[in-house]
Amino acid sequence: MANKLRYQIVIGMIAIATVAGAIFILNRPEAHASSQSTDDAYVRADLTVIVPQVSGVIMAVTVDDNQQVQAGDPLLRIDDRALRIALDAATATIAGLQAKLQLQQSLIEQARAEVAASSAKLKLAKRNLTRSANLARDGSGTVQALERAEAEWATQRAAYERDRAGLRSAEQRTAILQADLEKARSDKADARLKLSYTSITAPVAGVVAQRHARVGGYARQGEPLLTLVPLDDIYIEANFRETQLANVDVGQPVDIEIDALPGVQLKGHVESLGAASGASFSLVPPHNATGNFTKIVQRLPVRIQVDSGQQQARRLRVGMSVRPSVHTDAASAQEPTPATAAVQAESK
């Protein structure tokens, strides 16, 4: 009888402990779990969209869809004949203006010589006028001689002013030609730059995707021709509930399961925590200042870097669904970022 009672007591204690443990686990804050996981996670990469900076007919396309390219590899070429003509025209304009400037310099020298000659004649006319005036004053000269001297002085003065005006005009013309030459040089540089835009090369290494460019097609400035996907620089963007982030920190290890690769588990680490929830960037952000309010748990993006040296990581493709599990019980590899610290402070 005693053994049976003892057995019942033990069973009762086990049941009580089980219920208490279940209650504790169910009421424990979500963030206190040793790991945090989410199904709202996808493979991402910083895509590079290739758009032409000049319009024209596509003469050659040197890449295919899903082809791997390196930075600097040629992608396509746009018809450059019109731009070469524009460059040649700008070069010819520069040559013509330089010739005009040389001619104008000769005209300036000629105008300066004419001013010097007019100045000498004016000085002579002034001396003759002074002499004739003195002679007329003491009666040694005639009034007619004085009048002729005055007329000669006036004529030479007018000629001097005319030549000076011609010199100023020639110098101003030189300044105008110099400005035209600078503009022509700028036009040539612009034409050369636009000509360089007709040969489009890969700015980064990646895989070609969304190739719209076709030989004979027309490329319009600003319209996408293809996209480069840098598969060597992919990462995971995981949207965790805000209630999961209290202990998530930069550098913590992450186990990554891929829906497309059953049985494959990759390793990674938390690279950064988002500064705002996804709803904050929506076109119509939620506004709860008036009316009834229903609290909705927000999700914040966490960027997870896939560790290098994993063979299976080569099979990841942008857009794949994954399930990351962050081990929050592990020490972070570095000091938390300001964004991480802010999230942790709000969660406490």
Image: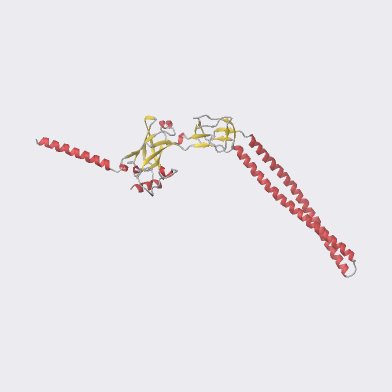
* Residue at the farthest left position: 1
In the drawing, does residue 96 fall left or right of residue 241? right
| Image location (x, y in percent) of residue 173 | 72, 50
In the drawing, does residue 32 fall left or right of residue 61? left
Q: Quadrant of residue 28?
A: top left
| Image location (x, y in percent) of residue 21 | 23, 40
* Residue at the farthest front position: 291
From where the camera sits, is residue 337 visible? no
Residue 216 in the image: above or below residue 172: above
Residue at x 75% of width, y 53% of height: 167
| Image location (x, y in percent) of residue 218 | 58, 33
Number of marks drawn:
0
In the drawing, does residue 308 fall left or right of residue 186? left
From where the camera sits, is residue 253 visible? yes
Residue at x 65% of width, y 36% of height: 84
Residue at x 17% of width, y 39% of height: 13
